[in-house]
Amino acid sequence: MEKMIIATKNKGKIIEIRDILKEFPVEVISMGDAGYDAEIDENGCTFSENAMVKARALYNLSGEMVLADDSGLEIDFLNGAPGIFTSRFAGNNVSQEVKNNRIIHLLKGIDTQFRTARFVCSIAFVSKNISFCTEGSVEGLISEESMGTDGFGYDPIFYLPEYENTFAQLPESIKNEISHRAVALKKFRAKFAEIITTI
C-alpha cells in the first residue's frame, strides 16, 4: 500500500484526513511518523501557494505522495487580514486568547454588517506525476466576544448566523461537515478519485 504523508503534526488533522480518504488504498501518516521534523518556510503570498510550498518541500525530502494544507481567517473590515499571517497576527509566541482579543479590539464598536469574515483552507497534493490544489471556505461574522470552549484557534470568535453559534459552540460533527477544511478535503477526495490511477 502506498503512503501519503500529511505535512502536519496535528493529530486531529491526521484523523480527519484519514477518515475522509478511508475508501482509498493509501496509508495516511503524519510527517512525524514518516521521520520528518523540518520546519518549512512558508514564503507564498496566498494560502494555496503556502500549501504547495509545504507539499513540494516534503515530497522532495520523502519521494512519497504528500498532502499539505494552509488555512486562515480573512476579515473584510481589515482588508482581508490576518489572511496568510493568521497564526502570527498578534505576534509570535502569544496565546490564542491574545490573538482573539486583538481582533475583538480591532472591531470594537463596528456594526454587525461590517463584521463579515471567512475561514479559508487550501489543500495541496504532490506526487511523482501530478500536483494540484483545492480550496474551501465558510462565511461568518466576527463576534463581539469569545464564545464556546470547543474547537481551536479563532473558532470562539467566528460566528455563524444560520447556526446562531460560533465554531467553538458547534458540535464537532456539524463543524466537520461545514468547515473550510471539510469543504477543501471533499473537493480533494473527488479529484483524488479521478486521478488515483495516474499517481
Image: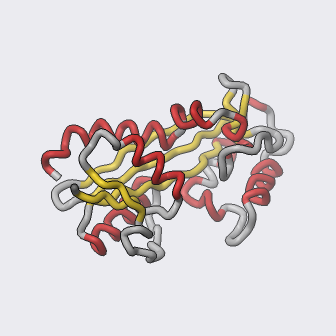
Number of numbered markers? 0
| Residue located 70% across and 71% down the image | 93
Colouring scheme applied when the structure was drawn:
secondary structure
| Residue located 57% across and 51% down the image | 72
Q: Quadrant of residue 165?
A: top right
| Residue located 38% across and 65% down the image | 53
Vertical arrangement, residue 110 with respect to residue 61, above or below? above
- Nearer to us in this view, 113 or 171: 171
Residue most extreme to the top: 162
- Residue 122 located left or right of residue 85: left
Q: Quadrant of residue 87?
A: bottom right
Q: Quadrant of residue 19?
A: top left
Vertical arrangement, residue 56 with respect to residue 145, above or below? below
**Image quadrant for the N terminus?**
bottom left
Vertical arrangement, residue 95 with respect to residue 177, above or below? below
Q: Position of residue 73 (x, y in %)?
A: 60, 48
| Residue located 51% across and 40% down the image | 180
Q: Position of residue 96 (x, y in %)?
A: 73, 58
Residue most extreme to the left: 198
Q: Position of residue 5 (x, y in %)?
A: 35, 61
Q: Position of residue 7 (x, y in %)?
A: 42, 62
- Residue 167 located left or right of residue 48: right
- Residue 144 located left or right of residue 49: right
- Nearer to us in this view, 195 or 144: 195
Residue most extreme to the front: 1
